[in-house]
Image (spheres, rainbow, N blue to C red):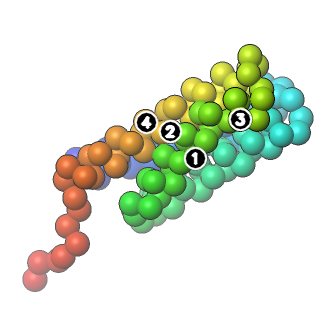
Amino acid sequence: MENWTNAKLCDVANLILGAILFFAPWVLNFDAGMVSTNAHIAGLAMAILAVAALAAFAVWEEWLNLIVGLWTLVSPWVLGFQGTTAMTVCVIIGAAVAILAAIELWVMSQNPPRLTTHS
């Protein structure tokens, strides 16, 4: 049961991080265009995946969270907005989401959930 609680806490953290990333362009005045759009899409994806994971846990949600987190982490270099506030926000939030997803995947590999029920 403890792993389930930890998984839910990670998903709630991902939801909060996704919301922060989604609203960051307005709050922190990111450049309009690709920089803001990237933050909006990545933040929305993180939040949707977190809500889906809270509703019904599935391994694929954690893999997608890992991918979105890693994309957010490297996006400043791919899209060319290094040295900006947007870069700092994307790197910190992307790293946090990727680390949380990796931890959840590792914990699940160490202690897989039971797929059978007892009568």
Q: Which of the labelled discs sits on residue 94, or is there none?
A: none
Task: Report which residue position mark 1 lands on.
Answer: 68
Task: Kindly identify which residue carries mark 2.
Answer: 97
Are dots 1 and 2 in contact, CB under 8 Å?
yes
Pointers 4 and 2 in contact (C-beta within 8 Å) = yes
Q: Nearer the viewer, mark 3 or mark 2?
A: 3
Rendered location of residue 6, percent (x, y): 31, 44
Tell me if 89 is positioned left or right of 51 in this view: right
Kindly state the secondary structure of the residue where label 1 is placed: helix
Callout 3 amino acid: Val
The residue that disc 4 covers is 99
In this rendered view, identify the residue nearer to me: 58 or 63.
Answer: 63
Q: Residue at x 84, y 26 (%)?
A: 29
Distance from the alpha carbon under mark 3 to that under mark 4: 20 Å
Observer-side mark, 3 or 4, equals 3
Depth check, front residue: 59 or 44: 59
Q: Residue furthest left?
A: 119
Q: Are marks 4 and 1 in contact (CB under 8 Å)?
A: no
Q: Label 3, on which residue? A: 78
- Comparing labels 3 and 1, the label whose residue is closer to the camera: 3
